Structure formats: structure tokens, C-alpha cells
Amino acid sequence: MRVTGAPRAPGRPARRARVAGAASAGRSSGTPPLAPGAPVLLPVSRAPRRDGLHVLVASPVHRLPAHAKVVALTALAAGVVAVPTGAWAALAACGLLVLFVVAASRLPVGLVARRMVVETPVVVFCLLLPLVATGPRVDVLGLDLARDGLVGGATLLVKATLGVLAAVVLAGTTSARDLLAGLDRLRVPRPMVAVLTFAVRYAAVLAEEARRLQVARAVRGGGDGRLRQLAAVAAGAGTLFVRGYERGERVQRSMVVRGWTGTTPALASAPATARQWALALVVPAAAVAVAVVARAAA
Amino acid sequence: MSEPVLRVEQLAFAYPDGRQALFGVDLEVRAGERVALLGRNGAGKTTLALHLVGVAGAPAGGTGAGRVVVGGVPLTRSTLAEVRRRVGIVFQDTDDQLFMPTVRDDVAFGPANLGLAGDALRERVDGALDVVGLRDLADRAPHHLSLGQRRRAALATTLAMEPDVLVLDEPTGDLDPAGRRELADVLAALPVTLLVITHDLPYALQLCERSVLMDAGRVVADGPTRELLADDALLRAHGLELPYGFDPLAVPGPEAPRR
């Protein structure tokens, strides 16, 4: 080692001089001097934190018990579906109700809009409906369309959009675990809940494995070109399947040694209070009322 | 001498594809003992461990011979549940052991299967989480924990069953030195009988006063860990090596503080 008595003496003033130089340089440029090796702090992102689909913000919708929200979503969807075709005022009222729920959930608008992309196939179907339906024709912007198809397609589009919007709110305001516990509380058959539970847990594990396989390919120069990438993905899927299958056997083994005999214990969850039920069912009840009035008027 | 808490007699086993893994294993473990099960890869350590909880061997398929007796109860198809209550095993890959959405749900899985519910279940779960120091992380998903935390969570799932014998399969395989030490602190404070499968020889010396060396499906040596690790010729003959610079005669072991 070179750090012995003699070299250290001249070394010290040199180091002090360097630090002093850095400090004065900092002062001259108007910023406070930084300690050497100060952490580089990046600006804090203002986007809410997320865990899967669950968006971690506080809202009255987040606080409702999961099973109450599932019942509310089902009732709301039933109400919207029951509105007669072409009853635009009633559909608009339902739309306002759903938008109210979206606002109450405090989910970022952009995020909700992006998640609406799952509706795309339905939108395509609704747009095709006026072209393929039969019956009286109308002329819209030079296109020869079926009148019934136009009205039916538009109604279907609105109903589907409202349903998907409500489902996006449910997914964004409820953790996967609470949703599973809620389904259990609603007496969804235990084996189905168990299958969903494993899907939630091992989707994360499989995604991580897929990422590792992808990285292992990429660092060895794989993955250039669309076709080669597709081939690699196909091969990776095979590997993932085999790994998943083997893991299934090991997981089952670890369940068996902890006393599992075929029935999976329920996930713990609290019942909903009368107040929470009332709160959860206000909007669906209003939607059902709108549908009943609209049907009576039609 | 009382009945050993774990007795294995002339255990032999061949997998369904005909590959024989165990060739007559004899092993006795007394209550409160801490035993390291050493051996190179493929020596049959994990296969033996799977026999102790009845997930390999005659009760679960494959062909075998010999007996496993846990606390006086011979392992048969009809005593599987009882044996699995007494012997807890922590598997090598924690992703296999943590299969529920949160740590708390996972720790509750075993005791709930034993029939616990309500406050009794909650107390059992909290107790196990306290032992491994993970009470604060109980509501996290397993994939949001570090490897060391996952390992301790997996340990808690087994401790919640309150086993008489705890079997750990390669507990330090993927841990960093701090995670390794934290696990050692937890294990050293546990009042249960321990069987630690490992080829981490310093870890064996740190935790276990006795070691059993396996090779090619048989027990080839059984004695105080320090003597075994100091026998260079024995280790070399069975494919084990001490880490560079490690002298088993110069470091403290489990004997001193426990006497």
C-alpha cells in the first residue's frame, strides 16, 4: 500500500484545495456547493402508483368492499342493457351516471381512456352493423346504410361503452386479491376462485420468466426482424409451457404438505355494512329506474 | 433413550422411470437436534427430504423399500396427514411455496387446512410472521418481496403449522450475505428440530452441531459437523469443498453458545 507517512502529508493539502475549488466554482455559478457523491434525485413522478390494474389513489369507490362493487357493476350493466333501442335520453342519463362514478373513482382520465381500448372489437362490430343489416335504407354522407342497423349499432355501441367503462372502474379501484375474496364471498364456486387466484399469482411469475427468456435471447443477438422474433416467441412459449407445467406440480406438492386435501380455504374478507351496500347500489338503482321508465314510455 | 423424533430405516427408492435415487438410507434424529444434510448435487438429499413428508416414495408413486417413522408414527398412506403436520418442509424455490395473493394469505393456508379459523387463525399467522420478522410486509404480494424476505415468508408458511421437525432444502442458495445472516438468526432462535439440506458448508457449521453426509443415495458419514468438515479426504472423496481460506477448526460453531 502506498498510503504511508511521507506521501500522505503532501496529499492532504492537495485534496483540500480540490474541494475548496469545487465549492468556489459552485458559488460563482449561483448553485449551492454539493457534497461530493451527493445522490442524483430525479423529479418525483406525479402519476399515481399502480399494482397491476389497481390504481392506488384514495376515493369513495376504492373504499367500497369488492363484493359490493361486483354486485353494483352487474346491476348497472343489467340496467343499461334493459334500456330500449333508440331511447337516447335514457342512454344519456345512464351515461351521466357512469361518468359520475368515473369521476368519483378519481382514476386519471387518460388511463381510463387507454384501458377502453379493450372495447375495440365491439366498436368494429357496431360500425359494420349498418352496412350488413337489411331493411329500409337511409343515405348518410353518400353511404347506403340500413336504418335499423344504424340505430341498433349506435345503441349497442353506447351500451357496450358504458359497461366497459364501469368494468374499467371496478378493475382500477379494486386489488386483485380483494376481488378474489369478494367473488368468494358472493359464493362463486371455490375451485373457480382458486384457479383465478393461481392465475393472478403466477401471471407475475410467468411474466418474469418470459422476460428472462427474452433477455437471454436478446443478449445473444436474437430478436432481430419481425419473423425471427415471432419464431423466438413461439419457441419461448413452448419453454414457458413446460416450465409452467413443472411448476404446477411443485406448487401442488407444497400445497399437499401443508394439509391441502382438495378444498382451498377462503381468502379472508370483511362483510359490507348496510351503509356500504346502500352507497354501492345508488347508481345501479338509478340506472335500473331509468331503464324501467324508458321501457314504460316506449 | 427416548424414541427419536425422526427415524429412517433402510430407505430405498427408484423413480417411475427406473432411475434409483436412494440405496438404503438410515438416519435417526432426536428431538431438539440440528442436523445438516450435506452432499453434492444428485446425492439424493432432496429425494430423502421429499420422503419425510410423503410426497415421494411408496405413498406417492414410484417403487421403494424401507420405513420412515416420525415421532413413533410410521409413514403410510393413512398417516400422511399426521406426518405432514409434524414435519414441515421449506422448498428450494420460494415461488413454488408462495402461491397465494399476499404473504398473510399464504401463511394462513396451512393452519386453515388444519381447521383453524377466526381469531385463532389470525393469532397463529401473526405469531409465525413475528418469528421471521415480516409482520409489516404481511399484505404484500410475494413478487414484491426481496429474495431474502421471500425465503423468510416461505419459512413462516411452514412455521404456522407448528411442526416438530423443520426441513429446509437449500435455504441459502440464492441469498446475499445479509439475507443469509438474517435467516441464520431466525433459524438459530427456533426451538424446533432442524434438518438443513445444504452444500453451504460454513452455514452447516454455523447452525448445526451434527452433520450427515450423503453420496450416491447412501449416508456415508455421520458425526459432529466440525469433525466432518475438518476431514479433508472425506470431503474430497464425496465431491464437497470448503470455500477458499475457510478453516472449520478456527471459527465458532453452534456448540459453544448452546452448552
Image: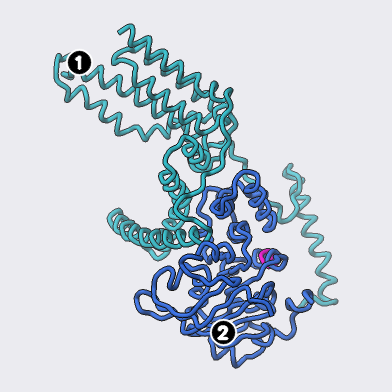
Give the image quarter of residue A230.
Answer: bottom left
Residue carrying label 2 = B240
- Residue at (81, 60) in percent of width and height: A16
Q: Quadrant of the N terminus of chain A?
A: bottom right
Q: Are marks 1 and 2 in contact (CB under 8 Å)?
A: no
Which stretch did the figure color magenta? B181-185
Residue carrying label 1 = A147
Against B12, residue A13 (above or below) is: above
Q: For the residues carrying marks 1 and 2, which lies nearer the camera in this image?
A: 2
Q: Colour of chain B?
A: blue
- Residue at (23, 18) in percent of width and height: A150
Give the image quarter of residue A210.
Answer: bottom left
Q: Image check: A178 left or right of B254?
A: left
The front one of A233 and A12 is A233
Task: State whether discs 1 and 2 lie on one chain.
Answer: no
Q: Quadrant of the C terminus of chain A?
A: top left
The chief SS type of the magenta part is helix
Against A146, residue A14 (above or below) is: below
How far, Cα to Cα, is label 1 from label 2?
83 Å
SS category of the residue bearing label 1: helix
Q: Is residue A276 magenta?
A: no
Q: Colour of chain A?
A: cyan
Q: Amino acid at mark 2?
A: Leu
